Image (spheres, rainbow, N blue to C red):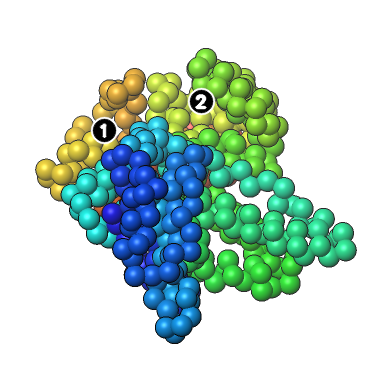
Amino acid sequence: MLLGGSTARGHADRYSDIELGVFWHQPPTDAERQAAASAIRGDLVRLYPYDPAEEVWCDDYMFGRAHPDQPKSGVLLEVVHSTTDFLNRIFDAVLQNDDPDALKQNLIAGVVDGVPLHNAELVQRWKDRAAMYPEGLALAVVNRYSMIDHFWRWEMWLARGGNLMMLYQSFTQTEQQLLHLLLGLNRVYYFGFKWIEVVSERLAQQPPDLVRRLRQVYQLAPAEGAHELAALVEETYDLVEHALPQIDIARLLARRGARVTGLEPSDAVYRYTMHREQTEQLGIQYVQADLSTWVPPASTFQTVIANMVLMDIPDYEPALQNCILALEPMGRLIFSILHPCFEEPGSAWKGQGYVAVRDYFTERAIPQLYGAFIHRPLSTYLNSVIRAGCVIDQVLEPQLAPAIAAQHDAEWYASVPGYLVIAATKPHTATARPKGATLHGHQ
């Protein structure tokens, strides 16, 4: 048995009820529930019948009275009964199978935040099991809630006689999707949106001034509120792109209104992307080709993104040159790689507390669980971009928030960057430069 909800989390107010979770090894009988009701010093509201869809039994009581002769005037006490087998199946679905279902996550959050009242040992085992938020679950949550479409309809609702009911329904749906995205991004189990400030406190990564801006969406004039919400959507997508590079960037960009062409060499991934485009159409054109031998349509794209690609290609320079050739003048190239200065496995950090660098100047293949990546000095990539005639605009070294790093046993990513992101622009008169025109460094 455990105490849950806002009472357990320590932020209950005068409107809060008291939530109890009772877990049985065998399904409770009506007689057992009635006996418990008779023992409680309160007014029974109702013993609800078993709900086969949610596999729970619910009891409502009013605890205490505002006045002795005013029954059912106290604090609402909600008791939810379920079996231990049911809860174990919920844990398996979410923690092993990466099921992003919000109701299932809410049950796990209730256990994680709950205060044990009986059989604390069993409750603690559940807590320990949920202590590590799975990486696959984060990806599943982000993928489920990242498609924020039809937001443009706010203009339609205003044009149709100022239909504020549908307008604010659209705003609310979008805000809820954003919060789900941020919970997944921050590896926090969904626990409801009754307390936005409490949700925000658990988000190590979030757009600036999130709570005030979410409220302001409803307080501003409708058009201004829509623009504020659109800005929050863009900023949240930016956070996702930086923190979860394995997310399908093509689909994220398409959801933001871009016309996207995706390039993929492998049969399996190409078939998967084509199937997903057929079942969830975003207008993406997929091409199966090797980036280093692909013949791009010249001066076609405004932006080319090579996400965690170049360090996996042995002959990377033709691939990079093809990216630049595909750009129109003043187009932007953005590529991310494993940071070549800090490639030691994270497991070494635990024993030594630092990242060792060896054979930095030697280009070589480093075996991975699947395949290998090619280590090259940082200057190799930077000088290749410069020789191709591009201007480097920005170099980013993303840092994992310390709270998230600690939660996932990845403290080294809070102290040293695991990834490098480089942005460059192709000038109107881009021409390849001789190899002597490089940044200072080993070449």
Tell me if residue 157 can be seen.
yes
The three-letter amino acid code for the residue at tag 2 is: Ala
Residue at the limit of the structure toward the top, as seen here: 267
The residue under the point 64% across, 67% down is 217
Question: What secondary structure is found at the residue carrying circle 1?
Answer: loop
Q: Residue at x 44, y 64 (%)?
A: 44
Within 10 Å of the Cα at label 1, are there few (<14), some (14-19), or many (20+) other Cα atoms? some
Q: Earlier in the sequence, mark 2 or mark 1?
A: 2
> What label does residue 361 carry, if any?
1
Which residue was labeled with disc 2?
Answer: 319
Q: Is residue 17 visible?
A: no
Q: Element under label 2?
A: helix
Q: Quadrant of residue 200?
A: bottom left
Indicate left or right for 243 with 284 as reference: left
Front-most of residues 264 and 208: 208
Which one is in front, 196 or 152? 196
* Front in this rendered view, residue 33 or 329: 33
Query: Residue 365, how many percent across, how many down?
Result: 30, 23
Q: CA distance from mark 2 to mark 1?
A: 22 Å
In the displayed structure image, the side of residue 43 where residue 374 appears, left or right: left
Q: Quadrant of residue 421?
A: top left
- Quarter that holds the N terminus: bottom left
Q: Position of residue 186 (x, y in %)?
A: 40, 52
Residue located 70% across and 62% down the image = 168
Residue 338's x, y, as percent? Answer: 36, 37
Identified at 40% across, 48% down, the residue is 30
Q: Total of numbered circles in the picture?
A: 2
Residue extending furthest toward the bottom: 67
